[in-house]
Image: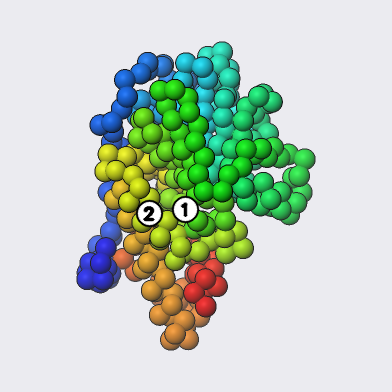
Amino acid sequence: MNRKEFLATTFAAGLGLAFVPSLVNCSSSKIVSQQLFEPLKLSAGNLAKVVGNVSRYTNKGGTVGIFETKDGFVVIDSQFPDSIQPVLDGISGKGKPVLYLCNTHHHGDHTSGNIAFKDPNTKIIAHKRVPELQRLAAEKSNKLAEQRYASILFEDRYKIDLGNQKITGYHFGNGHTFGDVMYHFENDNVVHMGDLMFTNMIPVYRTADGSDSRNWIKILEKAQATFDNDTVFIFGHGNKPEFTTGNKSNLKEMANFLEASNEFVYGNMLAGISTEKILEKHQFIPGFENRKTPERFAGFLDELRKTLS
């Protein structure tokens, strides 16, 4: 969205017209021929195929990515022990191990379930900052004994080669946290974005964890440049399960939202307008009523002030 489009969208919002992003479940045209497996049978949660043998699972916490191969499974993120258990039970029912568990970042709704993965042979992968941040968060919540940490750590890029599926983890810098990683299932052309993507919601934004709206925009732009137009994306959070997958247009909308948020908050800072005064007139960033999340809005504005000051 350029400046002209942003102003037009803001004007439309003032007339009561909400801008809602186009959220699409689409199929990649670059699928390598492979054996397709029957879906997991789960006792709870919402499971849906994305492309090929890549699925997404929602229950409580961040969206989980699941990939099945003839030798086992790769799981992206772990939610909480109770909410990930239906997935582990379903995997157990197929008689295959979890080969890799990949964490997108350290937040508890993505790593608390790590401890439910009991097989010591499961390799846990994350950015090198994740164990430290996970431990610090666990100390604050008195849950140190309930953690399992990644043991395979990387800085910028990590590749898993499973034969007819290659998975590459990319760290393009800190946007949501210091340890953000997106994972690309190359043959099926699916990217799990973790919490670099929230749809129809105000994102969780904590500067102490590494949130940086300006750099976040750059990361989303780099993702759009790195992956092609057929890529299907899995998002960390959406206000409905069906909005946890989409395409490049959703990444662009998220970047536009962050840019508009920066302009809105910085403009109010220059005018000496406090968060409390903003809240008297606004419940969302102008032009983005689809992201009305009242319980998060004040905190989001306050944290953005720290980034922009």
From the top left corner, tell me how far across and down residue 133 is, in percent.
66, 52
Q: Quadrant of residue 11?
A: bottom left
Q: Which mark is residue 133?
A: none
> Element under label 2?
helix
Asked whether the viewer can see residue 82, the reply is no
Left of 142 or right of it: where is 293? Answer: left
Left of 219 or right of it: where is 147? Answer: right
Asked whether the viewer can see residue 37, the reply is yes
Of residues 231 and 201, the one nearer the viewer is: 231
Contact between marks 1 and 2 (CB within 8 A): the answer is yes
User: Which residue sits at x=33%, y=44%?
Assistant: 227
Tag 1 residue? 172
Q: Residues within 10 Å of mark 2 (few under 14, many from 20)?
A: few
Coloring scheme of the render?
rainbow
From the top left corner, tell me how far across and down residue 33 is, in percent.
31, 20
Q: Disc 1 marks which amino acid?
A: Phe
From the top left corner, tell me how far across and down residue 247 is, in percent.
31, 44
User: Which residue sits at x=25%, y=31%?
Assistant: 29
Figure disc tally: 2
From the top left corner, tell me how far across and down residue 208 is, in percent.
62, 63
User: Which residue sits at x=66%, y=30%?
Assistant: 116
Q: Disc 2 marks which amino acid?
A: Lys
Quadrant that contains the N terminus: bottom left
Q: Earlier in the sequence, mark 1 or mark 2?
A: 1
36 over 186 or under it: above or below: above
Q: Quadrant of residue 240?
A: top left
Tag 2 residue? 222
Of residues 75 and 12, the one nearer the viewer is: 75
Q: Residues within 10 Å of mark 1 (few under 14, many from 20)?
A: many
Separation of residues labelled 1 and 2 (CA atoms) = 8 Å
Of residues 69 and 161, the one nearer the viewer is: 161
